[in-house]
Image: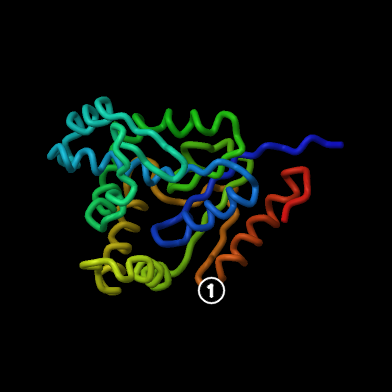
Amino acid sequence: MTKPQNLLIAIDGPAGAGKTTISKMLAVSLNYRYLDTGALYRTVALAAHRQGVGVDDEAGLEKVCADIAIEIDGERLLLNGEDVSPLIRTPEITMLSSAVSAKPVVRKALLHIQRDMGRSKRLVAEGRDMGTVVFPEADIKFFLDASLRQRALRRFDQYENKEGRQSLEEIEQDIRRRDENDSRRDVAPLRPADDAVIVDSTTLPVKEVLDLMLSHIRPLIGHRLP
C-alpha cells in the first residue's frame, strides 16, 4: 500500500474571498493544521497601535516585532500571553494590518514563524503571499477570489449585530483600498502564483468551493478523501 503523502497547501486571495472559512474546512477534512498568516500581521498591527508606533516607523516596527511574543493556540492568537483573537478583527486593525504587512522588517520577522510551521507539512496555510513567497515549494497552491461586491456582502453579513458596524458601502470602500494596498506594495504584492489553481467563489456555495479544492488534492494525497 502506498503511504499517504503529507502535503503543504497554500491558499492566497484578497480580503473577503472566503479564505479563512475554506481553509479551516479544508484543514478539518484532511486532519491538517491550519495557519492564518493574516492573523499574525494583525497581531503586530495591534501591538504597534498599542505602543503608538506608526506604520512608517520601520525602526519602531522592528522593535515591536523583537519585543513581542506571538503564539498560535488552535484558533486563538496570543500576544504576550493575552488572547487577542477578537481584538485583531476590528475594521481599524484590519486596515492597519494591511499597511504593516507591507513593511519588510515585519515580513522578515514573521517569515520564520510561518516557515517553521510548514516544515513538517500537513498544513493548510492561508494568506496573501503563501504560494509566491512564504511557501513557493508548496505541493498545491490555490488563489481564491470573488467579485468586490460579493466580498463586501460577506463581510457585511459577518459583522451583523455587532455594535457600530460599518455600512455595506463603507466595507466595500475599505476592501477596495485594501486590494490596492496589497496588490501595489513593493514587497510580496498580492498575486496568484504562476502554478496556482484559480478559484472564483463569487457564485459558488462554500461546500462547492471545498469540493472543487478537494478534487485537485485527491490525486496528490494518495488515499481516499471524503
In the image, is 43 to the left or to the right of 113? left
Residue at the image point whose x is 53% and y is 52% from the top: 24
In the image, is 16 to the left or to the right of 82? right
In the image, is 141 to the left or to the right of 185? right
Q: Please, is residue 83 above or below residue 115 in the view?
A: below
Q: Please, is residue 122 above or below residue 63 in the view?
A: below
> Residue tagged by mark 1?
203
Question: Can you tell which quarter of the image residue 65 is in?
Answer: top left
> Is residue 13 visible from the viewing direction of this image?
yes
Residue at the image point whose x is 44% and y is 45% from the top: 75
Percent coordinates x, y for residue 119 in the rendering: 56, 29
> Is residue 101 visible from the viewing direction of this image?
no
Residue at the image point whose x is 18% and y is 29% from the top: 59
Percent coordinates x, y for residue 99 in the rendering: 26, 47
Q: Please, is residue 87 above or below residue 171 in the view?
A: above
Percent coordinates x, y for residue 176 in the rendering: 31, 64
- The residue type indicated by label 1 comes to Thr
Which quarter of the image is occupied by the N terminus? top right
- Relative to the observer, which residue lies in front, 171 or 184? 171
Residue at the image point whose x is 59% and y is 63% from the top: 209
Percent coordinates x, y for residue 116 in the rendering: 49, 28
- Relative to the observer, which residue lies in front, 11 or 196? 11
Q: Residue furthest left?
A: 52
- Relative to the observer, which residue lies in front, 126 or 193? 126
Question: Can you tell which quarter of the image residue 6 is in?
Answer: top right
